[in-house]
Image (tube, rainbow, N blue to C red):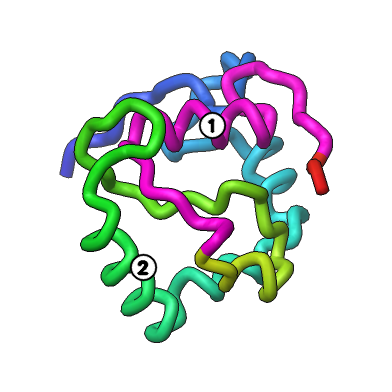
Amino acid sequence: MANKAMRPCAAPGCTTLTIGTYCQRHKKALERHPVAYRALYTDKVYRAARKVFMAEHPFCAVCGAPATDLDHIRPHKGDKELFWDPANWQALCASCHSRKTAKEDGGYGNRRRPARG
């Protein structure tokens, strides 16, 4: 069995080489973040509602490319009412969704923006 090649940690600005996605320091930091709301995305009712929404909105709301992601316009941060509100949903292509999420969550070296609302 061949060994995996080492690569830089995926955390923005970290150059520590690792076999996995994140170095030990960033892996531990990610584990401390509350991620309980992620279970909402695996709910069967949500997955069915997402499928219907995406069929009704097949193009990206930003650039018009084929949509791949259902985005929450205002980040829900675990708020179930906001999570389930279809008025807070928009269809985005992967590129636009990544860009929006990075801008809001502080990815790609951006500062985290405060939640609106």
Residue 61 rendering spot, x and y as whole percentages? 38, 38
Query: In the image, residue 51 lies at what x, y percent?
Result: 28, 69
* 53 shown above or below 106: below
From what the image shows, is residue 54 above or below residue 99? below
Q: Within the image, what quadrant is residue 15 found in?
A: top right
Q: Considering only vertical position in the picture, is 50 above or below 28?
A: below
Kindly identify the amino acid type of the residue bearing the numbered disc 1: Lys
Q: Quadrant of the N terminus?
A: top left
Q: Which residue is located at x 68 percent, y 28 percent?
A: 106
Tell me if mark 1 has few (under 14), some (14-19) or many (20+) residues whose alpha carbon lies within 10 angstroms of its own.
some
Residue in front for this viewpoint, 64 or 27: 64
- Residue 100 is tagged as 1
**Residue in the image at 22% along x and 62% along y:** 55
> Which kind of residue does numbered mark 2 sit on?
Arg
Side of 103 where 20 appears, left or right: left
**What secondary structure is marked by label 1?**
helix
Q: Earlier in the sequence, mark 2 or mark 1?
A: 2
Residue 52 position in % (x across, y down): 28, 71
Q: Residue 5's x, y, as percent? A: 31, 26
What residue would you read off at disc 2? 50
Residue at x 37% of width, y 48% of height: 91
Residue 78 located left or right of residue 40: right
Majority SS type along the magenta span: helix
- Other-residue count near label 2 (Cα within 10 Å), few / some / many at <14 / 14–19 / ≥20: some
Q: Is residue 99 magenta?
A: yes
Q: Nearer the viewer, residue 53 or 102?
A: 53
What is the quadrant of residue 36 in the picture? bottom right
Give, as a single range, the part of the protein colored magenta: 87-114
Residues at circles 2 and 1 in contact by the CB criterion of under 8 Å: no
